[in-house]
Image (tube, coloured by chain):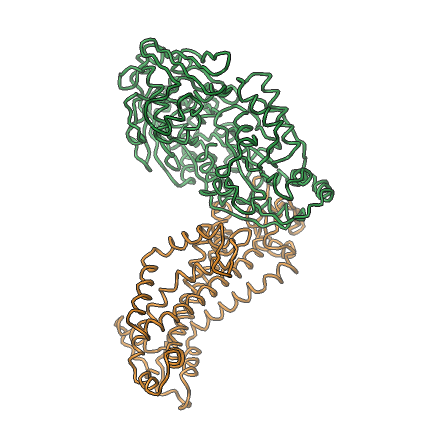
Amino acid sequence: MAAEPNPAPGSPGAGPWRLALRRLRRNRVALAFGGLLALIVVFVLAAPLWANHVADTGPNQTHTLEKIEVDGERREVVNVEGRPIGPAWLGAGGKFFLGADGRLGRDEMVRLMYGGRASLFVGFASALLATVLATILALLAGYYRGWVDTVISRTMDVIWAFPVLLLGIALGIALALGGLKIGPVVIPSGSIWITVLIIGGVLVPYTARPLRGTVLALREKEFVEASVAQGAGPLRVMFGELLPNLASTIIVFFTLAVANAMLFEAALSFLGVGVQPPDTSWGAMVGDGFDLISSTPLLTILPGTMIFLTVLSVNVLGDGLRDALDPRSKVRIEAHAGVAEPEGTAV
Amino acid sequence: MRKLGLVLLTLSLAAGSALGLAACGDSSAKEGGTLTGSYAAFPDSLDPAVSYSQEGWTAMYNTYLPLLTYAHANGEEGGKVIPALAESLPEISNDGKTYTLQLRKGLKYSDGSAVKASDFPSSIERVLELNSPGSGFYTGIVGAEEFAETKEGGISGIEADDKTGKITIELTAPNGSFTNVLGIQFAALVPGDTPAKDITTDPAPATGPYTIVNPKRGQGWSYARNPQWEKTNAELMPDLPTGNFDKIDITVVRNDSTQVNEIEQDETNWMVNPPPADLYASIKDKYEGTQFRVERPLNLYYFWMDTNRAPFDDVKVRQAVNYAIDSTALERIYAGQLGATHQILPAGMPGYKELNLYPHDMAKAKQLLEEANPSDMEITVWTNNESPNDEAGAYYHSVLKELGFDATLKTVNADVYVPTIGNVSTPDLDTGWINWFADYPNPNGFFEPLLNGEGITPTNNINFARIDVPKLNEKINELAEEPLGPDQEAEYATLDREFMELAPWAPYGTNTVSTFVDSSIDLDEVIFNPTFGHDLTSFELK
């Protein structure tokens, strides 16, 4: 990647966000993967269009005993041995474009699109939940320090001490039957929000701890002291002074959290404690296709590839954002790795 | 219900758990040599007092013998109880409460010690001391309930005389299937000083043709010839086979595709469970009749409907569901490993008389539902998360939606599924999936626990439909006291029809397993006993 010019040519008054955007635009790899992520988002958002106007079936509609015409030949969606039809591509007018999903004969393409919606929704919603909670906790811990910091940090340590997947599975099983009731908030079992809450909750320490460290450092800066000297209260300092300075870090952590949350969701759903049937997600589809992997590997490969591409896109885009928002981190990383490539002036 | 058997069997259908034996021996010899094999998972236990799985019972069929056993034969013939350590079948008193047996004289354990009559009560006490899942089979013996609670003082209802070999068992109430119960694995005799702890890794001396040696949990075990079998026991028990191999080595191989591959490469003899679902059809096509055979154990897969809750409190609604279910679709969901059935008793069970009261007819189903016009169409459909049972549940859910129900599918972890739907305080227990495996070939094993209204309990309930019809309860109770004969079988067939007319369930099939052997084994000689599964003594090189 090219070094950042110093100063940014032709824009002496450009603000940090504009500079960051400019750096991001120069990062072709990040942009390419950002484009891929956008394509994936469009793909899953188009699910109802494909389902209603092309495939003419819903994601949970079974077709076990049906026959369809593929390129003029009448074929069973699921044969007597329970083997699903393979990709029909456009031979059946878009129906069963990627074949059937298994012995229930559901349209794989439609399930892949709807499953992607669930995966992306859980990924983004969990990451958002984790980031919001982590930011609040980090601000409280870093600003107040003392016993507030101790309580928050040790609580995070306790959560962190659990193997994250086991904790997710345990919570998933515990909430699978009765759902969740917190005061007036009732989330029925099987709701996708249960998965969001589990993943979001479990991921909080992973963002909160590094953010807390940043807040502790910022807390000692002169601009905070100046703000306090001017009579700003804790809320004003936390959300008016510290939070804006955390923004770039939060954005980077958010993208990483999205990728982690998607992988986590895939693992939970693969193990049967994430998105609940008959709804699906890419992780659940990998699990569903697993027992047909010898005869119909596509059922596992397709959702697995979608997870891979999406997580890769989010991660590369996240790296690009980090480089754009905090180029010093790149200098630090490369210096640490022994790469003799000086970066331009830090913002 | 053989719970672990269910779990392993369904796992085998989905993820391809398979059980197998591999042979590498002298292919020219009819006898001798070593049979090597593999289990996809180590059985729940290799202790006769503890194991409650088909895999465990298969492993111990020819090692730890009860007083009675099941004939080493296929199908219905294999359902017959025959004497093993006892000289003959029990003498039953007129009131049906006293069973008298005579231990054969001169029997020895594999360590050379004598088999004593008192080993029978101590073995049954051991079952209760270990809080075995088989305890319930023996709590009908006088004093057994008390012993199960106190673990002290012995079971007063069993008298055993070591001098004469006479064993007398007193029951609290007549039990027509107690002869069957005396033949299952839990009743196998082990020496009286066998400790009350699981002996999987420290096997007790055996009475059968083989002894278990070198068991390692998670890895496997071997069998060696019982030295006392040839010396004494074989002659005393002429109806029991000796087996053709001198040694059998079994290892745990978790990859089912590897197991299939080894059979195809003639490195493995036998897989007791079906090959993985996605290979099943091709294996069947390629090897049926030469190396592959479909077996039909006694089981039933069905959807239950809670007859006490709307909308399923209306018989028309339940009948509508029966008409709506299409077994053809479910056969495909089970990858061809399901035999369609529409009644309580599975084929092969005494009393089975084919019924098909509800052939698939969606129009008729909708018409019946229209006539019933239930006010509550909001239902929850329960299933567990093991494939293909989860798919069967999803299919059922889609059928109910097609019928017009506002159905929600609830998929529960298989480990907690039965306790969950067996707890009547669990909300929304409207309808769901379940299966049932017979412990032994007696129709009472289906009616008494699953359909007798007197057995409904607040927790651990297995009458999932909560059907309680006093007239039918009485009939079940009457038949339960009578030993099985042609008259009783006819009564059970009538009972089957009467229940299906009330349609508390929508039965859809019996699951099959398979015999899959390599080219060196004579498939025709392999025995699949409906209670114990594959009989290791029947394996023979061509």
Q: Is residue B260 left or right of residue A66?
A: left
Where A125 sits versus B129, above or below? below
Where B432 sits versus B132, above or below? below
Q: Position of residue B396 (x, y in %)?
A: 60, 44
Closest to the observer: B18 or B347? B347
Closest to the observer: B318 or B39? B318
Q: Is residue A239 visible?
A: yes
**Figure quadrant of the C terminus of chain B:** top left
Residue furthest to the top in view is B164
Q: Position of residue B153 (x, y in %)?
A: 32, 23
Q: Position of residue B267 (x, y in %)?
A: 38, 33
Closest to the observer: A243 or B392? A243
Determine the image quadrant of residue B507: top right
Q: Position of residue B93 (x, y in %)?
A: 48, 12
Residue drawn 65% across and 56% down?
A: A56
For the colour green, the matching chain is B
Chain A's shade in the image? orange
Where A337 sits versus B435, above or below? below
